[in-house]
Image (cartoon, helix red, strand yellow):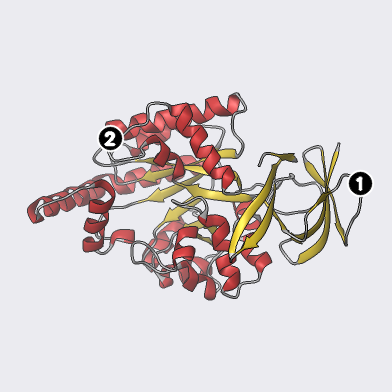
Amino acid sequence: MQTVLANFQIVTPDEILPGTVVLAGGEIEAVDAGTSRLPGAIDGEDDYLIPGLIDVHTDNLERHFAPRPAVAWPSAIGAVLAHDRDIFGAGITTVYDAISFGDYENGGERRAMIEKSIESLDVARAHELLRADHFLHFRCEVSDRGALEIFERHAGHPRLGVVSLMDHTPGQGQWSDLAIYRAFRRKKNGRVWTDAEFDAYIDQRRADREIYATPQRETIRRLASERRIPLASHDDTTLADVDRARDEGVTISEFPTTLAAAEQARAYDMKIVMGGPNVVLGRSHSGNVGAGELASRGLLDALTSDYVPTSLLEAVFVLSAGGMALPQAVATVTATPAAMLGLSDRGRIAPGLRADLLRVRVVAGVPVIRAAWRGGQRLA
């Protein structure tokens, strides 16, 4: 059975094509220029038709498992389904659910949430309860003593699609400014230290880093490489950070915190990934280099939703309003992440590819999703 989507502004990686798209068997059967009056066709009314979004990093799943500090949601399946509704409602048809291995202070709680997250995603997928296509993104906190053990247990998961090597030890990387780190923790977790307590905490974190970071990073890197899982660095700040990542076989530079790090990543042909919220807000929430600045310098390849699912589509149109051609902006959340992670069956509107599509209209400057298809089936 065919579905005909007529009279759309079809956004391809190279151009915006007024025309019609024909779907059949879960795939795109044809892309034709010009208007159509076929009986039964869905009239696009000149709305945009873009590929379904591909999100390589979202923290949204954890938000549903732990909606408040010290609150663990009792229904794991319920948390997964609520997350899936958020994701698909934001136009994300393929998602890499970021699961953090390492939490320093809440080891038991974090470990339980990791196990429940992975298990519940598997159950929901087996029962065909998910609208988006869910993969896993393991975020490995290399300076946390428990990260390697957890990673080794799950490294063979068939849905594991990307591994990022992280080190959030305060005083470097994303948290080079300790005052910003202290204020962030107070706001996010309600954590209040005396000066002496804070100094002791920082000393302990740095001591852990000295012991665990290098050996765990190397082992995780090796295990991921053996399985041909793409590796991402995280929060690279210095040229030395990027040099190390290159030597480790990293192909993705996620959230470089300085212009110098981004430029070095580009020199090594790494794909540079930034957060959609950074684009929409016009700044980094932790005071680092802005995604907009990197985009203006040709140093932005792909976007993630990070901590706000709806930011992904909105960021596309913010980039376009700032001077980036719309096809190029759309590619940062479709074609580029697909190629980056080896998804050759999606990410573009072309015959033979999966019919993951969004109908989008801009209303008062904001992109609004009017319909969404995954595998040719309209689910929103």
In the displayed structure image, the side of residue 96 where residue 307 appears, left or right: left
In the displayed structure image, the side of residue 143 where residue 291 appears, left or right: right
| Picture residue at 25% right of the left edge, 62% below the top | 180
Give the structural element (helix, strand or loop) at label 2: helix
Q: Residues within 10 Å of mark 2 (few under 14, many from 20)?
A: some
Position of 157 relative to 250 (above/below) = above
Outermost residue toward the left in this view:
196
The residue singled out by tag 2 in the image is 107
Residue 275 shows in the view: no
Tell which tag, 2 or 1, sits nearer the viewer: 1
Specify the quadrant of the image occupied by residue 129: top right
Does label 2 or label 1 sit earlier along the sequence? 1
Position of 344 relative to 253 (above/below) = above
- Mark identifier at residue 39: 1
Type of residue at label 2? Gly
| Residue 127 percent location from the top left of the image | 60, 24
Residue 217 shows in the view: yes
Q: Nearer the viewer, residue 250 or 247?
A: 250
| Residue 142 percent location from the top left of the image | 34, 46
